[in-house]
Structures are given as C-alpha cells and as structure tokens.
Image (cartoon, helix red, strand yellow):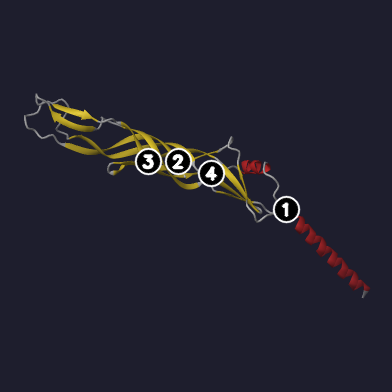
Amino acid sequence: MKKSYRVLAISIAILVQSSGRMADAPATVSYESKLTGWDFGAGVTASYTFGDAPIKSAQLDSGNVLRIDEDSSARVGFILEVHYLLNDIADAKKKEDLKSLPRVGRSDTPVRIKANSRTPHFTSGPMFTVELGENIVKTVGLGWVFALQRYDITIEGNNTYFTPLRPAFNIGLSVIVDPKVKTLADEFKPNMALPAGTAIRFKEEARLGIALVCSTRF
C-alpha cells in the first residue's frame, strides 16, 4: 500500500512540474501585415503621346491652303489608379520594430504605437491607371508604382499587426493608350492647297504614350 501511495505521489509531482513548465513557456507571437495587396488611389498625371501632335482644329486660309491648329502632345490630367503592392516588411525589420516598444505582456486592450517615420517601408508593384477627360475616360495605362509606407503597430495579446498609415503617397510610371487622338483624314496633309469649298475631314486613332503618375491613398 505504501508503495502505491509513493507511486501516486511521484506521478502527481511530475504532473505539477510539467504544468509549471507549460505555463512558463513563451506564447507564440503571430504577425499580420497589411502593407501588401490591392489598394487604390487618386491623383495627377503628366503624360506624353507619341507621334504627330493631335489636331485641335483645321481650316482653309484665304489662299485655300489647309492650316491646322495643333494640340499639345504633352498634358496634365487627373487619374484614378489601382495597384498591388508586393514587398512586405522583412521578419528582421518586424522584430527590430518590436524591440523599441514597451513590454505590454498579454492584454485584451490594443496598444497602438506609430513606427519611426524616419525609416518608412519601401514597396512597389504593378499599377493600372485611368485618366479622366471630357469623354470620362481619356487614357488607360499599365505600369509600376513605388511607395514609401509609414505604418503603425498594434499589439493585441500575442498578435501583432502592421497597418499602413493614411494618407499615403505613391509615384509611378506607366505606358498609356489614348484611343481617340484626332488627326487629319489620310487624303489631307497640313499646308496642302485644296479646291475652294472642300470639306476638311478628320479621323480618330489610338496612340501610345508614357505617363508619370503621382497619387495618394486615403
């Protein structure tokens, strides 16, 4: 009987010791970053359309010579853009950020601390743009966007969240397509002599161009 009690006591001691070790074991810390993925913005663009300058208007002068009023191939406009940011914060950077935070332990109350703005996170990704114009859509484009993200850190118990601060600013470069560039019809050339009373005809064609995009996210 004494032997049975001794075995039971030893078993209980082992169980208590194991429970203490489990309680002392550090909890697993999880990281969730919201600095990548889809996002959208609005801003301005400076673009240039390749080829001959678009035509604003054309008329015959007193000598029946065709004169044209050219529009500029370069312009500034308003754009909407959608992009996908690819580069997340490196694990080493996440741990470095956490070292500067106070020890908060396990808590159900969020502790929000803004990261050091002197070391923002650099990221980039593909971008789709729509330039707004008189006919709603002036150009569409596809390019690459670059962003320096400031972010804050939220700790909730053992969970850590990295969230971008708003507003955020981006700069990008894209190849654009202008589907409706106004030009003279094929049978007409600038400065050509025409019979009196000739009706001047135009056509619209698609042209490629390049655009510098500056946008912000709210």
Q: Earlier in the sequence, mark 2 or mark 1?
A: 1
| Circle 3 SS class | strand
Q: Is residue 165 above or below residue 107?
A: above
Q: Amino acid at mark 4?
A: Leu
Q: Earlier in the sequence, mark 3 or mark 1?
A: 1
Name the quadrant containing residue 117: top right
The residue that disc 1 covers is 26
| Circle 4 SS class | loop
The residue that disc 4 covers is 165
Circle 1 residues within 10 Å: few <14, some 14–19, many ≥20? few
Q: Are marks 4 and 2 in contact (CB under 8 Å)?
A: no
Q: Gap in Å between the C-alphas at discs 3 and 2?
A: 11 Å
Circle 4 residues within 10 Å: few <14, some 14–19, many ≥20? some
Q: Amino acid at mark 2?
A: Thr
What residue appears at the point 6 percent right and 32 percent down from the top-left corner?
Answer: 197
Is 133 situated left or right of 83 in this image?
left
What residue appears at the point 68 percent right and 53 percent down from the top-left corner?
Answer: 28
Is 175 situated left or right of 65 in this image?
right
| Circle 2 SS class | strand
| Circle 1 SS class | loop
Name the quadrant containing residue 48: top left
Q: Amino acid at mark 1?
A: Pro
In this rendering, the label closer to the viewer, 2 or 1: 2
Q: Where is residue 168? Give x, y as percent.
A: 49, 41
